[in-house]
Image: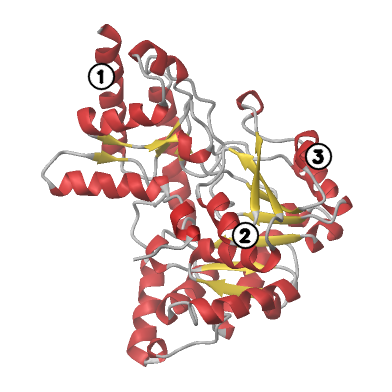
């Protein structure tokens, strides 16, 4: 059967591929430890589960909903943004989607024509570039130096800007690095984007998972001009441990939201009804569980980071948010005789039975990503196996 060029050129998600391979080997009876997915290991909080059950039992979850989302959820999003961002929007400026990933996909579909460019800081979440390409656009990668916590500057962005630049993607806290842009850094980037009429795609999905003295500043809150230039992308998956429920949302320019809704109407019809009723409870109900999970992630971060930096050849700046470590393993590669990080991670899986994600998929060929959204026993044993693997290879 003939495949389109679009399908032939599409690269699969390295995170999902690593997870799938780990599950395949585990099904064969191997003792595989997987720290691949950005998926909290907590069950969805009980109050959210109960809201979903009530929606099913009442019959509300049995039917199609409006493409943009049920009115209750769109209103809940407005109230959520007002509470945590201090910004006022209307329900018409919101769109509920099948995961935050589809919000991004729909946005790129409506803003890009063939050859239009989107600036993507490196390292980047694996789907940004592929989604831009699927929309006919061209991803323009701008490297954030590790010495600057992988963050890009206005000078970096200006060097990459052309007359075809339509948007810049900002993910803070970041997947995969866990770094956070400061308010001053965001203000500079925001003012640059406004000056050049470049849309800011603000992926805020990890905004409530921040640790230590770090603070998350939504770029849309810095000034009215920057807010008008920003599309907020968020969702319930990470904050409320609802990855399987697939509910994301976009908030911003009403014309873009309407166009994105039209895309969704032809692609998904509407997000899953029962998940939408669950998301209403997540956004408007008790928030105690959010803090409980955040504290657990912070405790794991503090303990895990101390162990990872003890692995020979590993260096790692301590993340400020999200739930990933992104160590540089260049020295370990050299001492173990590897020329690329993907072969290193493949051998870790096949020989040490540890599944993690190659940094090459994030545009960082000297790094690996370790998700600490797993129980502590798994994380501790993971580090032991990696350390033993490196020490064994180094001796040869």
In the rendering, at what x and y percent does residue 30 appear? 14, 40
Image quarter of residue 153:
top right
Q: Look at 66% across and 61% down and name the residue there.
A: 232
- Of all residues, the one furthest to the top in this rendering is 395
Q: Look at 70% across and 36% down and name the residue there.
A: 152
Q: Is residue 123 left or right of residue 45?
A: right
Q: Is residue 294 above or below residue 235?
A: above
Image quarter of residue 18:
top left
Q: Quickly name the residue at label 2.
A: 136
Please tell me which of labels 2 and 1 falls first in the chain: 2
Q: Is residue 311 above or below residue 359?
A: above
Q: Quickly name the residue at label 3.
A: 158
Front residue of 39/115: it is: 115
Structural distance between the alpha carbons of marks 2 and 1: 45 Å
Residue 206 visible, this orientation: no
Q: Is residue 144 left or right of residue 72?
A: right
Q: Is residue 34 left or right of residue 304?
A: left
Q: Look at 30% across and 20% down and name the residue there.
A: 387
Q: Quickly name the residue at label 1.
A: 388
In the rendering, at what x and y percent does residue 124 appear? 56, 43
Q: Check disc 2 and report its element: helix, strand or loop.
A: loop
Front residue of 205/195: it is: 195
Structural distance between the alpha carbons of marks 1 and 3: 45 Å
Front residue of 288/57: it is: 57
Q: Check disc 3 and report its element: helix, strand or loop.
A: helix
Give the foreground label among 1 and 3.
3
Please tell me which of labels 1 and 3 falls first in the chain: 3
In the rendering, at what x and y percent does residue 338 appear? 37, 19
Give the foreground label among 2 and 1.
2
In the rendering, at what x and y percent does residue 362 appear? 51, 39
Structural distance between the alpha carbons of marks 3 and 2: 22 Å
């Amino acid at each position: 059967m003939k495949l389109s060029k679009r399908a032939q050129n599409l690269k699969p998600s390295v995170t999902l591929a690593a997870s799938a391979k780990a599950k395949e080997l585990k099904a064969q009876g191997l003792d595989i430890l997987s720290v691949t997915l950005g998926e909290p290991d907590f069950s969805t909080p009980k109050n959210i589960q109960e809201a979903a059950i009530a929606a099913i039992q009442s019959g509300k979850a049995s039917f199609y909903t409006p493409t943009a989302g049920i009115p209750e959820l769109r209103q809940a999003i407005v109230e959520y943004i007002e509470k945590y961002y201090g910004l006022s929007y209307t329900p018409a400026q919101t769109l509920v989607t099948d995961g935050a990933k589809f919000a991004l996909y729909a946005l790129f579909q409506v803003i890009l024509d063939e050859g239009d460019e989107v600036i993507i800081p490196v390292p980047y979440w694996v789907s940004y570039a592929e989604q831009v390409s699927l929309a006919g656009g061209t991803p323009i990668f701008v490297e954030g130096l590790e010495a600057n916590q992988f963050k890009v500057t206005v000078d970096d962005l200006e060097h990459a800007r052309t007359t075809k630049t339509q948007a810049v993607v900002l993910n803070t806290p970041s997947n995969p690095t866990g770094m956070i842009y400061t308010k001053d850094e965001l203000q500079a980037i925001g003012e640059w984007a406004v000056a050049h009429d470049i849309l800011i795609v603000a992926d805020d999905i990890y905004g409530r998972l921040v640790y230590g003295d770090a603070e998350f500043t939504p770029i849309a809150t810095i000034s009215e001009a920057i807010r008008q230039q920003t599309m907020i992308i968020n969702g319930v998956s990470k904050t409320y441990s609802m990855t399987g429920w697939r509910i994301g949302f976009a908030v911003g320019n009403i014309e873009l939201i309407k166009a994105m809704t039209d895309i969704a109407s032809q692609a998904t019809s509407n997000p899953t009804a029962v998940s939408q009723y669950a998301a209403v409870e997540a956004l408007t109900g008790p928030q105690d569980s959010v803090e409980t999970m955040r504290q657990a992630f912070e405790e794991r971060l503090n303990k895990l980071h101390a162990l990872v930096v003890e692995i020979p050849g590993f260096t790692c700046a301590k993340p400020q948010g999200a739930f990933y470590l992104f160590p540089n393993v260049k020295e370990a590669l050299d001492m173990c005789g590897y020329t690329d990080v993907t072969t290193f991670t493949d051998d870790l899986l096949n020989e040490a039975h540890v599944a993690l994600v190659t940094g090459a998929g994030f545009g960082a060929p000297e790094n690996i990503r370790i998700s600490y959204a797993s129980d502590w026993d798994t994380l501790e044993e993971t580090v032991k196996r990696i350390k033993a693997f490196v020490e064994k290879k180094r001796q040869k």
